[in-house]
């Protein structure tokens, strides 16, 4: 499902040039505040909304994809609304929960849209996050597109030779694709190690 | 003169018993540019991965030795050898493992322990050499195939190797990307060993060629002579390149 | 099962965050010490694999489809500590790059999906695959591990939502555990099918048995991380599942959970029956998928 929402932080605009660390700090502040302030602080929610709208205008970010992504949140909110309806005695106001989630989600989307991932990684490195974790995150981000493409190609190749059989067959084929994906990821890991060594690693 | 690359009776078998190389012996003089030809599965990539000690490190071979500038590769000097010998892999996605082009080109210099300023200068000049300065902030995923190859080449050049070993540098490139890469390679002074199916590239760049098949060296000689021998070429899954069919067998001058 | 922002309160976010930092930190330390250098890139590639694998759809019914969770599978393939690092990496990237799962809930998500699934999955896989020999045994073990890990993660998730006062335990737990008892069957089947697919093409990539050769290290990482996971589950679930008096009860009452009885009476017998049924299904399933000789089995369907 996440595949639809690949962010494209190549947008122009001056927000892109702001230091990544500052943007991340502000975004984290907004998210933690929005998620955790008491429900009665209406002013906070209004201010956050204004900030987000300002960022969208300044960064020239098209609202379409952001709104689309917000819709994907709805099943979770619906579930909670349902549970709240089931237990009228509860203290929970599901509308506030939905508002919190929506604002936080929009904040993270806007951060991803205005900050290249490489810069975020550099901030993590400076913040003394363990190097092994940063390396793993960086490698994952580098190769997830490669592997996602491979998945798609394998899926298409399978589909073009599959002529509507039962669900069981569909599961077996999908599992074969996943298995094949693991094999390819392992092989690529070996090649990446070779390439790292060839350029003097260790 | 000490050869840049000397391989003596090199043999290799994979753990499953498949013998990939039989008694390979060859030497490459400094400054030479040699084409390595052969059908798929002939052992080209296996041979190349011996040249900087990657394969023997993982799975010990079955004898023979590789010497770089007269020094046999051992586990003690393998790091030094890798500074001398730059290896460009077949799939650019294997080689470009960093988040951006600039970061990737900088990986080698960083590992060499250069200072920040010296490393940055190396990266900049390598990027200029391959003409990718304007794309240096891009993630590798957003490059065309030709740009990816050039980025890989920049990553190798930034380590300033004296020997350049290339595995299928032009596979998957469109004609323009291929042209640009060939022009780039021609301008690089290092000793070059190029494994490829691109026979016209060999005619253009390599005065000498080696044909490998079934893990053995079948022929080693002047490129135009080998490639003009139709029977030899067809017997080893190759063909006589088009550009030789309209010319007399003299080396192409450019 | 990715919890969004706004569904957890401060104390839950803090508690899950602390547990996840401790667990991930320990796992990183273990991996750095035990993993040979040439396997280091595999962590990043395995994370990319898990992400891509989650994009593959498994059709369920009426046009809906599910996807792999993968914690138990990755733990069986790479060992518990590496699996914790891999799944946590996937969650971090999903959170910040794709806004999937909340930032304040990242700790909870890493705890549920990164620690609970991998460790419970590994525990079940290692134990059962010792009892049942051969590839068939390992497949059955992994199928059952997939089910257990899914149900346990859902239980922990329900506990956190209840602890935060978002969804009452009496409503959240039966719903989450009930739904995931079925989703877990799918997870188990997918885990087993994927394992069989790998065994068919590259059996050399699979660890020989449930407990690989480097046992002392595995045991240590497993015990420490397992304790953390258990502690967390106890923390989130115990206030609701046990009829403890006073303090915790008062907390629960203040948060507005009236229907304690459901939460207390339901889990034990229903859980035991569910686990037995899932175990039986896993064994039957392994007989179904691993019986033909490997040659000729490929694409014979």
Image (cartoon, rainbow, N blue to C red):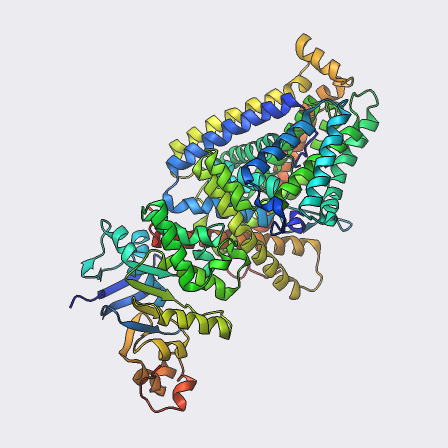
**Which of these two is toward me, C270 or B202?**
B202
The reply to whether residue B61 is visible in this rendering is yes
The residue located at (58%, 54%) in the rendering is A148
Q: Position of residue C299 (x, y in %)?
A: 58, 61
**Which of these two is toward me, B98 or B93?**
B98
Q: Position of residue C219 (x, y in %)?
A: 43, 30
The residue located at (27%, 58%) in the rendering is B84
Q: Position of residue B117 (x, y in %)?
A: 36, 47
- Residue B121 left/right relative to A138: left
C203, above or below A105, in the image:
below
B159, above or below B241, in the image:
above
The residue located at (25%, 59%) in the rendering is B62
Q: Quadrant of residue B89?
A: bottom left
Q: Position of residue A95 (x, y in %)?
A: 80, 30
Image quarter hosting the C terminus of chain B: bottom left
The reply to whether residue C87 is visible in this rendering is no
Q: Quadrant of residue C249?
A: top right
């Amino acid at each position: 499902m996440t595949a639809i929402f690949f962010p494209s932080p190549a947008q122009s605009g001056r927000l892109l040039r702001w230091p990544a660390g500052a943007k991340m700090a502000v975004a984290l502040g907004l998210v933690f505040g929005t998620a955790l302030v008491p429900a009665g602080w209406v002013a906070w929610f209004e201010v956050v909304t204004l900030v987000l709208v300002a960022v969208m205008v300044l960064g020239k970010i098209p609202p379409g994809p952001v709104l689309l992504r917000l819709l994907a949140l709805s099943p979770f909110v619906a579930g909670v609304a349902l549970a709240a309806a089931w237990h009228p005695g509860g203290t929970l106001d599901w509308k506030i929960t939905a508002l919190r989630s929506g604002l936080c989600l929009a904040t993270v989307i806007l951060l991803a849209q205005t900050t290249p991932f490489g810069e975020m990684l550099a901030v993590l490195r400076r913040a003394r996050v363990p190097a092994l974790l940063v390396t793993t995150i960086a490698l994952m981000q580098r190769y997830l597109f490669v592997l996602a493409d491979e998945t798609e190609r394998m899926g298409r190749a399978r589909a073009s030779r599959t002529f509507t059989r039962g669900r069981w067959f569909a599961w077996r084929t999908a599992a074969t694709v996943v298995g094949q994906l693991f094999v390819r990821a392992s092989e690529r890991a070996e090649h990446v190690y070779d390439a790292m060594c060839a350029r003097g690693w260790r | 003169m000490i050869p840049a690359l000397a391989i003596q009776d090199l043999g290799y078998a994979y753990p499953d018993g498949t013998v990939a190389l039989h008694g390979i012996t060859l030497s490459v003089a400094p400054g030479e540019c040699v084409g390595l030809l052969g059908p798929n599965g002939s052992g080209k990539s296996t041979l190349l991965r011996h040249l900087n000690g990657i394969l023997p490190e993982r799975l010990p071979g079955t004898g023979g030795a590789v010497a770089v500038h007269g020094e046999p590769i051992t586990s003690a000097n393998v790091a030094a050898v890798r500074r001398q010998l730059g290896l460009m892999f077949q799939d650019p996605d294997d080689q470009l493992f960093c988040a951006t082009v600039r970061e990737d080109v900088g990986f080698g210099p960083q590992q060499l322990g250069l200072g920040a300023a010296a490393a940055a200068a190396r990266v900049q000049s390598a990027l200029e050499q391959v003409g990718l300065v304007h794309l240096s902030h891009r993630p590798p995923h957003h490059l065309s195939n030709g740009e990816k190859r050039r980025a890989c080449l920049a990553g190798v050049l930034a380590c300033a190797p004296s020997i350049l070993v290339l595995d299928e540098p032009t596979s998957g490139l469109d004609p323009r990307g291929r042209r640009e890469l060939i022009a780039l390679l021609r301008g690089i002074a290092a000793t070059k060993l190029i494994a490829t199916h691109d026979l016209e590239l060999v005619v253009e760049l390599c005065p000498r060629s080696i044909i490998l098949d079934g893990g053995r060296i079948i022929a080693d000689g002047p490129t135009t002579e080998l490639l003009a021998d139709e029977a030899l070429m067809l017997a080893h899954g190759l063909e006589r390149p088009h550009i030789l069919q309209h010319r007399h067998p003299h080396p192409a001058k450019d | 099962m990715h919890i969004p922002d706004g569904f957890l309160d401060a104390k839950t976010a803090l508690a899950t965050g602390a547990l996840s930092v401790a667990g991930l930190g320990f796992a990183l330390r273990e991996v750095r010490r035990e993993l040979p250098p040439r396997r280091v890139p595999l962590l990043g590639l395995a994370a990319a694999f898990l992400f891509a694998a989650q994009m593959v759809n498994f059709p369920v019914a009426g046009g809906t489809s599910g996807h792999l969770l993968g914690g138990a599978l990755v733990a069986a393939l790479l060992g518990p500590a590496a699996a914790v690092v891999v799944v946590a990496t996937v969650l971090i990237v999903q959170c910040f790059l794709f806004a999937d799962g909340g930032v304040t809930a990242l700790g909870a998500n890493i705890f549920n999906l990164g620690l609970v699934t991998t460790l419970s999955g590994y525990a079940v896989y290692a134990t059962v695959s010792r009892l049942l020999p051969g590839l068939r045994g390992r497949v059955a073990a992994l199928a059952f591990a997939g089910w257990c890990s899914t149900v346990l993660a859902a239980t922990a998730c329900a506990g956190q939502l209840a602890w935060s006062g978002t969804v009452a335990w009496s409503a959240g737990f039966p719903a989450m555990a009930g739904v995931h008892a079925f989703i877990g069957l799918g997870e188990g089947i997918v885990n087993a099918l994927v394992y069989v697919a790998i065994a068919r093409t590259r059996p050399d990539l699979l660890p020989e048995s449930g407990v690989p050769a480097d046992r002392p290290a595995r045991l240590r990482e497993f015990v420490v991380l397992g304790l953390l996971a258990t502690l967390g589950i106890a923390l989130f679930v115990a206030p609701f599942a046990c009829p403890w008096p006073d303090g915790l009860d008062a907390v629960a009452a203040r948060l507005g959970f009236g229907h304690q009885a459901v939460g207390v009476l339901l889990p034990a017998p229903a859980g035991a029956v569910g686990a037995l049924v899932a175990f039986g299904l896993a064994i039957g399933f392994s007989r179904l998928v691993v019986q033909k000789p490997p040659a000729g089995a490929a694409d014979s369907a």
